[in-house]
Amino acid sequence: MRPVTKTKCKWATALAAVIAAAASAGCTSGHKPSAADKAGGSSVPTVLRLASVDWSGHHNAPLLRQFADQVAKLSDGRLQVRVVFNVGWPAADHEQQIVRDVRSGRYDLGWIGAAAGTS
């Protein structure tokens, strides 16, 4: 058995947070599904919007895309993450803006630097 790395733990934690957010969003959604599965749930995937201050060519962009791909893969396509780049840029408080946008419900998830949480 291979040892669990810090990166794998971070991905697992992030995925758990996404799944929890999706479950919460699904319970409060006013969306009326157009098609239902045998259990009565929607066959339409839940799409979560992830806000990032980074641009699509930034070195973090492949990580965000990989995260979105893994969420779709592990949920068998029932849960999708759509990354929205350049959110809040060029404002000086762009990362705090993402926090406010997630809190208000404008975005479901946010990607900010660790230092942004200290100000």
Image (cartoon, rainbow, N blue to C red):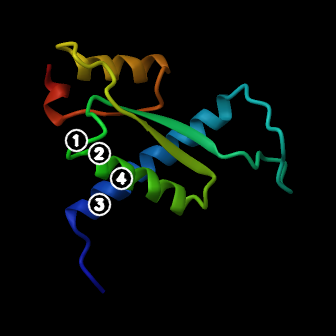
Whether residue 14 sits left or right of residue 44 in the image: it is left
Name the one closer to the observer, 111 or 86: 86
Q: Distance between the residues labelled 1 and 2?
A: 5 Å
Quarter of the image that includes the N terminus: bottom left
Element marked by disc 2: helix
Tell which of 119 and 61 is nearer to you. Answer: 61
Query: Of the residues under marks 2 and 3, which one precedes in the sequence?
Result: 3
| Distance CA(mark 2)–CA(mark 3) | 20 Å
Amino acid type indicated by mark 1: His
In the image, 49: left or right of 12?
Answer: right
Label 3 environment density (alpha carbons within 10 Å; few <14, some 14–19, many ≥20): few
| Mark 4–mark 1 distance (CA, rounded to whole Å) | 23 Å
Residue, far front: 57
> Is residue 64 toward the left or the right of residue 80 in the image?
left
The residue wearing badge 1 is: 58
116 in relation to 45, above or below? above
Mark in the foreground, 4 or 1:
1
Q: Which amino acid does label 2 sit on?
A: Ala
Q: Report which residue position mark 2 lands on.
A: 61
- Residue at x 31% of width, y 39% of height: 56
Q: How far apart are marks 1 and 3 (CA)?
A: 23 Å
In-image side of 81 versus 1 (left or right): right
The residue to which callout 3 is attached is 9
Give the mark nearest the N terminus, 4 or 1: 4
Residue carrying label 4: 13
Q: Which of marks 4 and 2 is nearer the N terminus?
A: 4
Is the residue under label 4 in contact with that under label 3 (CB below 8 Å)? Answer: yes
